[in-house]
């Protein structure tokens, strides 16, 4: 199974006050920590960002930077539609930009269950595997407003939310400065 991947960095980072994906994390940035976990799991990895932020990411990363297809802030589904439009394979893996401890076998675990519908991780639904064939329905649902959340899209497409076998803090999500401090503490305990 050939799979492309995309890191979704299209959020407003309103609780953090600035683009959290570019914040320092250990000896690197938060998004670089996610790239280190995600890139080995897929053939080609891209980064999805809001249109106004594309230049900030292009100068920092060798991975393709994909600005949102839509101007409106439409959430993770916009990044998924953007990624499915770009990907050259039959499947797209999606990763959040603010979850630096992702399982190194996340895509393999999702792929074991994949048939022809999306599969997303329980408790971390942005982590998913999406068939390219669902693009027309996702795009129509996003444009009409019928689909607004990842879970509504998974349900509409007959997909599955599945358990991922991973350590407890695997899907620790960073939204605030306190979260970032806790993630740095957790990272130090992993070394």
Image: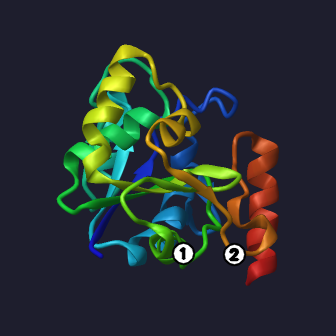
Q: Position of residue 144 (x, y in %)?
A: 36, 15
Helix, strand or loop at label 2? It is loop
Badge 2 or badge 1: first in the primary sequence: 1
Up-down relation of residue 64 to residue 32 (above or below): above
Nearest the camera: 126 or 179? 126
Q: Residue furthest bottom?
A: 191
Residue drawn at x 55%, y 78% is: 104
Residue drawn at x 39%, y 17% is: 72
| Image quadrant where one finds the C terminus | bottom right
At label 1, counting other C-alpha atoms closer than 10 Å, the crowd grade (few under 14, some 14-19, many 20 or more) is some
Q: Which residue is mark 2?
A: 165
Q: Which residue is mark 1?
A: 109
Up-down relation of residue 21 to residue 5 (above or below): above
| Image quadrant where one finds the N terminus | bottom left
Left or right of 87, for residue 113: right
Helix, strand or loop at label 1? It is helix
Left or right of 117, for residue 134: left
Left or right of 165, for residue 69: left
Residue drawn at x 39%, y 39% is: 79
Q: Position of residue 134 (x, y in %)?
A: 31, 44
Nearest the camera: 97 or 116? 116
Nearest the camera: 52 or 152? 152
The quadrant where residue 92 appears: bottom left
Q: How many marks?
A: 2
Up-down relation of residue 34 to residue 152 (above or below): below
Colour approach in the figure: rainbow
Up-down relation of residue 137 to residue 89 (above or below): above
Left or right of 137, for residue 183: right
**What is the C-alpha distance between the residues marked 2 and 1?**
8 Å
The quadrant where residue 14 appears: top right
């Amino acid at each position: 199974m050939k799979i492309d991947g995309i890191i979704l960095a299209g959020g407003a980072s309103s609780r953090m006050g600035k683009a959290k994906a570019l914040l320092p994390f250990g000896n690197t940035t938060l998004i670089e920590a996610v790239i280190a976990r995600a890139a080995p799991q897929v053939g080609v990895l891209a980064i999805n960002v809001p249109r106004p932020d594309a230049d900030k990411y292009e100068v920092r990363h060798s991975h393709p930077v994909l600005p949102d297809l839509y101007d409106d802030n439409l959430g993770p589904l916009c990044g998924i539609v953007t990624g499915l439009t770009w990907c050259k394979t039959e499947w797209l893996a999606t990763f959040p930009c603010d979850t630096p401890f992702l399982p190194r076998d996340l895509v393999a675990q999702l792929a074991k269950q994949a048939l022809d519908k999306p599969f997303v991780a329980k408790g971390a639904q942005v982590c998913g595997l999406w068939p390219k064939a669902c693009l027309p329905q996702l795009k129509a649902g996003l444009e009409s407003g019928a689909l607004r959340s990842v879970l509504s899209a998974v349900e509409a497409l007959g997909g599955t939310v599945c358990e991922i076998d991973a350590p407890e803090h695997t899907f620790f999500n960073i939204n605030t400065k306190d979260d970032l401090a806790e993630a740095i503490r957790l990272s130090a305990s992993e070394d």
